[in-house]
Amino acid sequence: MNKIAKIASLLFVLAAILAPCAVFAQDSDADAAPVVAATSSVDLTPLYGIGAGLVLIGAAYGIGKIGANSVENMARQPEVAGKIQTAMIISAALIEGVTFFALIVCMLK
């Protein structure tokens, strides 16, 4: 991988992590009274977005590794390609299930 592609992928990952923070930003209304939770005085809302971004990055990385290794192994041993493909699909489905659960946990307060 060349240097430009590495830098571009790093910037993309950084943007994916920081983008949810802008979604949860508060309004800049000076007249609005600050909302303070009864149980906590610290607003953790931006951390939920960062957590969701990290979950998505981890899931994409995991499914990408599964796909890459599966294709490589199928190329080495074509006679077991069916078994490898079945295991790959089951593993990817399990990762997606855990990802959806983690996203729901991150988004619910």
Image: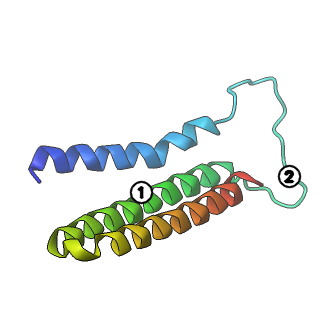
In the picture of the structure, the residue carrying the numbered disc 2 is: 37
Kindly give the residue lying farthest to the right in the view shown: 38
Kindly give the residue lying farthest to the front in the view shown: 79
Give the residue drawn at x 30%, y 44%. 11
Q: Residues within 10 Å of mark 1 (few under 14, many from 20)?
A: some
Placement of 77 over or under 16, stated as above or below: below
Between residue 92 and residue 33, name the one nearer to us: 92
Residue 60: which disc?
1
Question: What's the distance in space between the residues labelled 1 and 2, CA to CA?
Answer: 34 Å
Tell me where residue 55 appears, x and y as whole percent.
52, 59
Placement of 8 over or under 89, stated as above or below: above
Is 76 displayed left or right of 42 in the figure? left
Tell me the quadrant of the picture where the N terminus can be found. Answer: bottom left
Identify residue type, mark 1: Ala
Q: Nearer the viewer, mark 1 or mark 2?
A: 1
* Colour approach in the figure: rainbow
Q: Residues within 10 Å of mark 2 (few under 14, many from 20)?
A: few
Is 93 displayed left or right of 39 in the figure? left
Tell me the quadrant of the picture where the C terminus can be found. Answer: bottom right
Kindly give the residue lying farthest to the left in the view shown: 2
